[in-house]
């Protein structure tokens, strides 16, 4: 690990930390908490530190993150169990640890600062590195493989659906034309193409390479599919009265979480206008936060990357 990588990890600041502690961690008494997106252990360290009776199961598919989190959470001893896996598999990982249920589940869907800042991972357009973007380095699919092999129509879909890229077709066309001459290898090449092909962002909007890189990262790691499966797994794993908190960073994720919570909190899913309910739906959750919780000015002053974070919390009935 380079000095730069180490410094990046030390600078990693967990988002909405005070709010996570408030909603998920009791001040005293035993509690079993699943951190389904362990990352570099920031949230988990705070949750284990707040209450000495908390036992935590941390799940992550990134080997680098797991190795670092083991050091960060060493103070908790056997109260912390860390395992490799997709966060959608949290119920299976909990069963392997002997947990029948959990009192709280945390999902922080964003990419961590150390991952962004490590050029070799290929997540950021600000650093030149390989077009990788895999959370799990054992998986074969990389951003480069998508760019070099996906049909034009699939590239358009990825850029449009996952990045909401304005000019998705133009970008996909340019990607295909370029790969006919030489393969896509480096992030700097893609960032330059985005700047050249895509329209300038509206005032206050994200840079076009950011949206393009987001789209590829979501596709490489099946992030929306993972989130859908993880929400269902978390709802099933929670004990009655248990809470789940989900922190998301862009509209696609937040919309998915909001719709899941609304559906699971609804007493009826019948179409409007029916005289009686015929769907038989039974709510599993109740909404703890009617609107998403966002960072306050104090947090934004010390962690500008938290700006887009939104947290929604629900409780198991």
Image: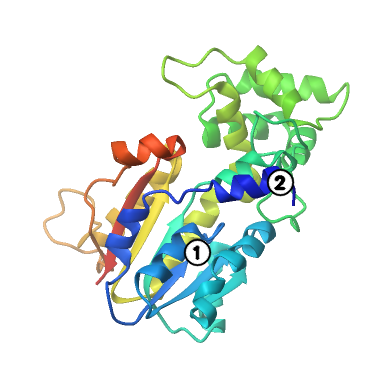
**Which badge, 1 or 2, is on the more N-terminal residue?**
2
Element assignment for label 1: loop
Circle nearer the viewer, 1 or 2: 2
103 or 221: nearer the viewer: 103
**Relative vertical location of residue 170 with respect to residue 297 in this rendering, above or below:** above
Q: Residues within 10 Å of mark 1 (few under 14, many from 20)?
A: many
- How has the structure been colored for display? rainbow
Residue 89 x %, y % = 55, 68
Residue 58 horizontal/vertical position (percent): 53, 69
In which image quadrant can residue 157 be found? top right
Residue nearer the viewer, 188 or 101: 188
Query: Where residue 267 sits in the image (x, y, percent)?
Result: 20, 62
Label 1, label 2: how many angstroms apart (C-alpha)?
Answer: 28 Å
Q: Position of residue 276 (x, y in %)?
A: 13, 61
Q: Quadrant of the C terminus?
A: bottom left
Residue furthest toward the right?
181
285 relative to 302, above or below: below
Using residue 15 as the reference point, say whether residue 220 is left or right of it: right
Residue 104 visible in the displayed image: yes
Q: Which mark is residue 3?
A: 2
| Residue 307 visible in the shown view | no
Tell me the residue at 48%/51% (across/down): 109
Q: Tell me if residue 56 comes above or below residue 15 in the rendering.
A: below
Q: Secondary structure at mark 2?
A: helix
Crowding around mark 2 (Cα neighbors within 10 Å: few <14, some 14 to 19, many 20+) is: few
**Dots 1 and 2: beta carbons under 8 Å?**
no
Q: Residue furthest bottom?
A: 98
Q: What residue is shown at x 47% (from left), y 56% (from top)?
A: 228
Provide the residue designation for mark 1: 36
2 to the left or right of 106: right
Determine the image quadrant of residue 195. top right
């Amino acid at each position: 690990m380079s000095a730069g990588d180490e410094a990046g990890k030390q600078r990693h600041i967990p988002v909405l930390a005070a709010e996570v502690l408030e909603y998920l961690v009791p001040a005293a008494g035993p509690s079993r908490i699943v951190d389904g997106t362990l990352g570099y252990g920031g949230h988990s360290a705070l949750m284990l530190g707040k209450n000495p009776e908390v036992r935590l199961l941390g799940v992550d598919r990134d080997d680098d993150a797991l190795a670092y989190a083991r050091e960060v959470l060493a103070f908790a001893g056997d109260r912390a169990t860390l395992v490799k896996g997709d966060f959608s598999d949290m119920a299976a990982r909990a069963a392997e640890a002997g947990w029948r249920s959990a009192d709280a589940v945390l999902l922080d869907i964003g990419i961590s600062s150390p991952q962004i800042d490590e050029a070799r991972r290929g997540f950021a357009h600000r650093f030149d590195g390989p077009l990788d973007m895999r959370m799990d380095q054992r998986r074969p699919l990389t951003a480069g493989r998508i760019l070099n092999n996906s049909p034009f129509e699939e590239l358009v879909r990825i850029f449009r659906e996952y990045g909401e890229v304005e000019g998705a077709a133009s970008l996909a066309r340019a990607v295909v034309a370029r790969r006919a001459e030489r393969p896509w290898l480096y992030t700097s090449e893609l960032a330059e193409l985005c700047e050249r092909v895509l329209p300038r962002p509206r005032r206050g909007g994200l840079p076009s390479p950011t949206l393009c890189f987001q789209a590829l990262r979501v596709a490489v790691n099946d992030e929306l599919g993972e989130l859908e499966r993880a929400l269902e797994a978390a709802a099933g794993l929670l004990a009655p009265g248990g809470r789940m908190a989900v922190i998301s960073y862009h509209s696609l994720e937040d919309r998915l979480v909001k719709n899941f919570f609304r559906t699971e909190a609804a007493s009826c899913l019948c179409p409007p206008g029916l005289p009686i309910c015929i769907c038989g739906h039974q709510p599993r959750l109740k909404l703890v936060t009617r609107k998403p919780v966002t960072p306050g000015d104090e947090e934004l002053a010390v962690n500008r990357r938290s700006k887009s974070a939104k947290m929604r919390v629900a409780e198991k009935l």
